[in-house]
Amino acid sequence: MRIFRLPAGYYQHWNKTRTGNMLRTTLLIPFIIYFTTSFAQQSAIEKFLADSSMAHASVSLCIIDANNGNVIEEHDPDKSLTQASVMKLITTAASIELLGPDYKFKTLLGYSGTIKKGSGTLDGNIIIKGGGDPALGSEDFPGHYERFIEKWVEEISKLEIKKIRGRVLTDDSYYDYQPVPANWSWEDMGNYYGAGVYGLSVFDNTLKIHFKTTKEGSIPVITDIQPYGSGMVFKNYLKSFGATVEGYIFSAPYSREGWIAGSIPVNNEDFVLKASISDPPQLIANLLERRLKEAGIKIKNEASTTRLHPELKSDKISIVSEIFSPPLDSVIEVLNHKSINLYAENLVKELGRSYKGEGSTSAGTEVVLEFLDSAGIKTDGMFIKDGSGLSVKDAINSRQLASLLLYMKKNGKHFGEYYNSLPDAGKEGTLKNYFKDPLFDSRIKAKSGTLLRVKSYAGYFTTLSGKEMIFSIIVNNFTGFPTNIISQIEEIIKETILYK
């Protein structure tokens, strides 16, 4: 019960007059009852729902006791809503439970055909065989993949190969040839957060396009595109304007052309937009081919992929080198801290390949739903179209999310690794700039989700009394600034921390 406090000095006044006219007392008692009931302090949830920004919004909220599952607070917990990136909580839970925290991906370098020792001629192809590693060459794992292409050149040079009659060929058949889920928006695909999943990925499937900008209204000049060798050509429709970033890249998987539109800040010597690499297997083939030629090795045919040359695919490969990814728990930690869509979509395809024999999004989402069923989580009204939450056709409810988090805490074989993958609110990852109130310090580990008119949070927190809680909040179609929604969600959590 929340107590409404009367104005300071009221009680002193009452004491002075309590022996006065009994009629005054009779009139005052109903006034106090009316005053305290009509103007009693609203709860944070009530204030949130009554806010003008929520006039047309939908909210699904569920806070439960993490020890027994008892409901602490809820509002429409069974309403299915678009949840954005909190979907990653489901994907990573299924992945770490079904694949295990030590699971690793493997990339192979080898060759087909034979090497003539006298002439140093390879009658065949140099082959890079993808094994689904989502992090190959990623900046998020410094040192792990250090100089991996140079090391490949060194290993090939040890074979005393001087001439290749075939080509550098990447075998990207580990997953299907549908890099992005069918329900993703066109406006997302060309940007780094909309990068697709390939049997052979590299550098987070991300291009960095460098610009120099000058005065307002001028056309930014592209000064560099890294990494070299993507083969992409971009038509530039950008403008220099203001100080905010409104620039977007439009391209499709396997395309060779795209365009850039919108605006980027003025007077910047080196502004970077990040685009998705449209054909990572081709890029890595190009990069290795270039390095081999620089090492003095002649190559007859242009670098390519088994997607374009299925007749060259061969299971008879002489292995030269193997590269293993970091263990899955490390990949998942980066995934949940930085909310990397690519890694989440990759894990969905890996689940499909491991459990259904098909490296596709549809097969992987089937595995995820089966995992949830086995965990006793009701999936009625749950619609999973991808692994990252980027699809606006996804929908889940707050009770389902809270139930998953409870299952992981109570029954998850790898709960420690799963829990540690979540960022500390106010300190790390996508939550670094939120939940900054000292009350939240070291009390919340959670995942956030954001799309246009969508805000969601789910995770674990501890109250001042030491109780462990699980929370899930999904908001759709609010108006006004997202920061207002975030601050009110913070108030809901703060109130629970203080009073439960």
Image: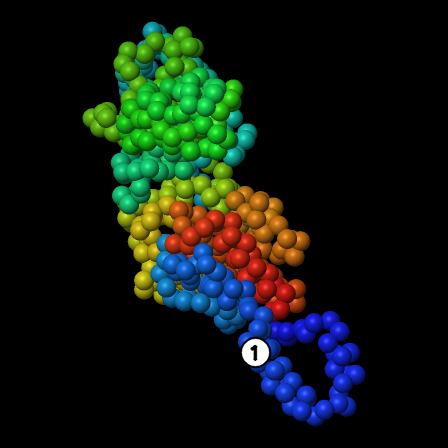
As drawn, 82 above or below 45: above
What residue is drawn where x is 46% and y is 63%?
49
Q: Nearer the viewer, residue 214 or 448?
A: 214
Amino acid type of the residue that numbered disc 1 sits on in the rendered structure: Thr
What residue is drawn where x is 25% and y is 29%?
307
Please provide percent x and percent y for residue 71. 49, 71
How packed mark 1 is, by other alpha carbons closer than 10 Å (few <14, some 14-19, many 20 or more), is few
What residue is drawn where x is 61% and y is 66%?
467
- Name the element at disc 1: helix
Q: Is residue 324 visible?
A: no
What residue is drawn where x is 67% and y is 91%?
23
Q: Is residue 433 left or right of residue 215?
A: right
Please provide percent x and percent y for residue 93. 44, 53
Residue 161 lies in what quarter of the image? top left
Q: List the single residue furthest toward the left.
A: 311
Q: How many marks?
A: 1
As drawn, 51 above or below 191: below
Please provide percent x and percent y for residue 441. 65, 53
Label 1 sits on residue: 37
Pick the quarter of the image with the N terminus: bottom right
Q: Is residue 129 left or right of residue 466?
A: left
Residue 225 lies in what quarter of the image? top left
